[in-house]
């Protein structure tokens, strides 16, 4: 694994062709260009964001962040730490109503309470509560195990694999889909696995590269490529059909 501030990939800085009015299938140079453009603009993001740090917090945060912004998750994590619900056994022991109040800031607190308890049950019963034993599995096996837990979908599983186990599984989210769509890139199938396959086929399977790439996309989209995009302030505007006014957002 590479150190957090080390970037080893120097991809092409320019796209070989101007943006097209119609969607195109992205090529390797497009995927490489996007990474370089975002990295040059924002620098390393050094994800995963933490409050106290550690694998337990990473997994809990990956579950709580579903459908909500990270700021809300931080408040829930602080509540969990302050009330000493800071281990998988303590999650199981805490009555549902109490958990609801503790993680309320993260939204969907009833469903997320169940998800946390399902995961706690899983990791205790299968791995004696030891995340490192889960993280030691090969990626495909770990992913299969994670997806077997109620409430763990593909994005959450890949968050845990990439940022928790530090193994290369590219994370796809709604921000990724929005950005690629606005750049005029059409992904055949439009499914989570189709997007992931694109990055897996076009890039070296490197944990640090996947870590930074996903974090850079989220950083960029959250600030500029919003539902109503701020194209006049966007570093990608000259290479984006929406930014150039060729297509609508
Ligand atoms: S130019 Fe506009 S639509 Fe294109 S990536 Fe930037 S903010 Fe998004």
Image (tube, rainbow, N blue to C red):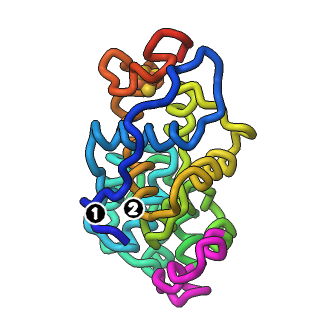
- In the rendered view, does 144 fall on the left or right side of 177? right
Q: Residues within 10 Å of mark 2 (few under 14, many from 20)?
A: many
Expressed as whole percent of the image width and height from the top left, the position of residue 119 reads 56, 71
The answer to which of marks 2 and 1 sits earlier in the sequence is: 1
Q: Nearer the viewer, residue 106 or 130?
A: 130
Toward which corner of the image does residue 37 lie, by quadrant? top left
Expressed as whole percent of the image width and height from the top left, the position of residue 169 reads 54, 62
Expressed as whole percent of the image width and height from the top left, the position of residue 156 reads 54, 58
Give me the residue at 59% from left, 70% from top. 118
Q: Is residue 139 magenta?
A: yes
Q: Which mark is residue 4?
A: 1
Can residue 217 be seen by looking at this rendering?
no
Q: Residues within 10 Å of mark 1 (few under 14, many from 20)?
A: few
Q: Which residue is mark 2?
A: 208
- Decide whether the magenta segment is chiefly helix, strand or loop: helix
Which segment is the magenta one?
123-143
């Amino acid at each position: 694994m590479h150190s957090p501030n080390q970037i080893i990939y120097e991809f092409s800085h320019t796209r070989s062709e101007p943006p097209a009015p119609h969607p195109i299938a992205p090529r390797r140079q497009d995927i490489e260009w996007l990474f370089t453009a975002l990295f040059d603009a924002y620098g390393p993001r050094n994800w995963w964001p933490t409050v106290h740090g550690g694998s337990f917090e990473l997994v809990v945060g990956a579950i709580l962040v579903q459908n909500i912004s990270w700021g809300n998750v931080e408040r829930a994590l602080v509540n969990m730490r302050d009330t000493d619900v800071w281990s998988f056994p303590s999650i199981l022991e805490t009555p549902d109503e109490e958990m609801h109040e503790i993680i309320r800031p993260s939204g969907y607190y009833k469903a997320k309470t169940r998800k946390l308890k399902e995961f706690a049950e899983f990791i205790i019963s299968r791995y004696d509560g030891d995340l490192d034993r889960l993280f030691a599995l090969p990626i495909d096996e770990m992913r299969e195990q994670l997806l077997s837990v109620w409430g763990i979908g593909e994005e959450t599983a890949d968050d845990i694999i990439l940022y928790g186990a530090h193994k290369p599984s590219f994370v796809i989210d709604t921000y990724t889909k929005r950005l690629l769509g606005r750049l005029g890139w059409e992904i055949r199938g439009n499914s989570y696995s189709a997007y992931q396959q694109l990055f897996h086929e076009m890039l070296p399977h490197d944990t640090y590269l996947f870590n930074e790439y996903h974090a850079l996309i989220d950083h960029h989209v959250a600030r500029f490529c919003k539902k109503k995009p701020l194209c006049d302030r966007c570093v990608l505007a000259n290479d984006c059909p929406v930014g150039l006014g060729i297509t609508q957002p």
